[in-house]
Amino acid sequence: MSDLNHPIDAGEADQLAARFEAIVGPKGVMRDPAELAPHLVESRGKVTGWAPFMVSPADTQEVAACVRLAAKSDIALVPQGGNTGRVGGALALAQDRAILLNLGRMNKIRALDPLDNTLTVEAGCILANVQAAAAEADLLFPLSLGAEGSCQIGGNLASNAGGIHVLRYGNARDLVLGLEVVLADGTVWDGLGALRKDNTGYDLKQLFLGSEGTLGIITAACLKLFSRPQESISAFLGLTDLAASVKLLAQARKDSGDSVVACELIPRIAIDMSLKHMPGAVDPLAEPHDWYLLMEATAGRPNSGLSEAFEATLAAGFEDGLIADGTIAASEAQAAAFWHLREILVEAQVKEGASIKHDVSVPTSRVPEFITQANEAVEEVMPGIRPYPFGHIGDGNVHYNLSVPLGMSPEAFFAGEDEIHHRVHDITHALGGSISAEHGIGRFKVGENARFKSPIELALMHKVKDALDPAGLLNPGVILPAARVDK
Ligand code: FAD
Ligand code: MLT
Ligand code: ZN
């Protein structure tokens, strides 16, 4: 019987590191505590884990050999990409007898096919480099999010990331044609097909997409590419009230022939904090408004009539009392400045002090109702708490973040965190929503997820995990509670 519950001690760590080094070479094993430190802390900086070392294979066969060695040595593997995830999914914990397996050295663009509109990349490619490879061929890979300069495509796919373009192009899982995956027994599944249609049974790749490293290690992917837009229009709009946001979005979609690619909700508090904490931040409008919409629409051909359609939507929006003030970007630089403001508001909130995060979705039409109810509930739990709800309203996805009440210590604030999560998630559920729209479950939302998944869903998820990783070696404690298996 193996004992997976005691941490790896120093002597065992030396022996293990030597065995992994025999597979990946000295460049592939990181043990220096200073170098290792950023890989052990999750992106919000709230939790720091522990692992004796990190192994970084250079190719698929090395990943497979590492998985076989881990299985033989009864140690768990925590796959890691750019470590930008928000739910602690890439966090190694001592009690799991885990080491980190980082895909960063597997960063080759394998092939681009402009006739098939496909791009085959290794898992460790930085998302921005994947976008750039597509752009070089005058094509588009549309996945776009604030961490794109450091997250890896393998991490994006494993966490089924969303971002700002889901409204038009779908989530990460919708952008994949094929995958190469190292399974928990160390075999390699070559599912790197590039077919748009393949109806020959279970769609196996979907099991691994969004599985957060718990079912297999993604080593490469064949991605869908799209034509690059030839015309683009971005508008920054001050709304008369929150309810105007969803009405305006629906109208813009209709008038533009569904050409809206991104639609983000921004509250005034986020503009204020960005102006306060982020050098260079500029308020696009002269007067403050409680709520803003940042929208982008694109067309595949120049002079398509998009601008006229979009301007007509905005004119009607003013007339119908939905828009109080607004501006359309007059240049690419101005559009980039609008989107920069959207991106930095995440960091601005961190700089303001302690915060609590939620990443929920509800039917888009119910976003205003959700925010109103959640604001009332959290104020009741903690008077003075400062709601900071923003995000991908076009997908019904609200990052319902909260900032510490002025003058309250972080300790007192976090003492109320569980109750706040419960109240916000109960409201989400009652409105037909999800407690994780795009960030995943990781380690941080395992308990909350179990409150809302039906017993049949949980049982099916356990069956899938048991079938693909019977020894529980891949990312134990992520998505599902860690199951310890006697062998
Ligand atoms: P990691 O954080 O390293 O890992 C994420 C999960 O995937 C972990 O469970 C890990 O074990 C697993 N994993 C990683 N690589 C592999 C692999 N090759 N095979 C199997 N499992 C693997 N998310 C959104 O959805 N939308 C956003 O708009 C968004 N914006 C963000 C903005 C900022 C500033 C930050 C810091 C994060 C943001 N995120 C967003 C969170 C996030 O999900 C992503 O940044 C990204 O998708 C994670 O990629 P990563 O390479 O950093 O993965
Ligand atoms: C975003 O949309 O900016 C992110 O998902 C928010 C976050 O990372 O917390
Ligand atoms: Zn987001």
Image (tube, rainbow, N blue to C red):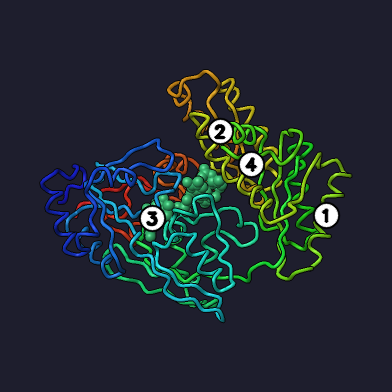
The verdict on label 2 being within 8 Å of ligand 1 is no
- The residue that label 1 is drawn on is 311
Q: CA distance from mark 3 to mark 1?
A: 42 Å
Three-letter residue code for mark 2: His
Three-letter residue code for mark 4: Leu
- The residue that label 2 is drawn on is 277
Three-letter residue code for mark 1: Glu
The mark closer to the camera, 2 or 3, is 2
- The residue that label 4 is drawn on is 431
Mark drawn on residue 64: none
Q: Is residue 461 visible to the viewer in this orientation of the structure?
A: no
- Say which quarter of the image contains residue 306: bottom right
- Whichever of labels 3 and 4 marks the residue nearer the N terminus, that label is 3
Q: Secondary structure at mark 3?
A: loop
The verdict on label 3 being within 8 Å of ligand 1 is yes
- Whichever of labels 2 and 3 marks the residue nearer the N terminus, that label is 3
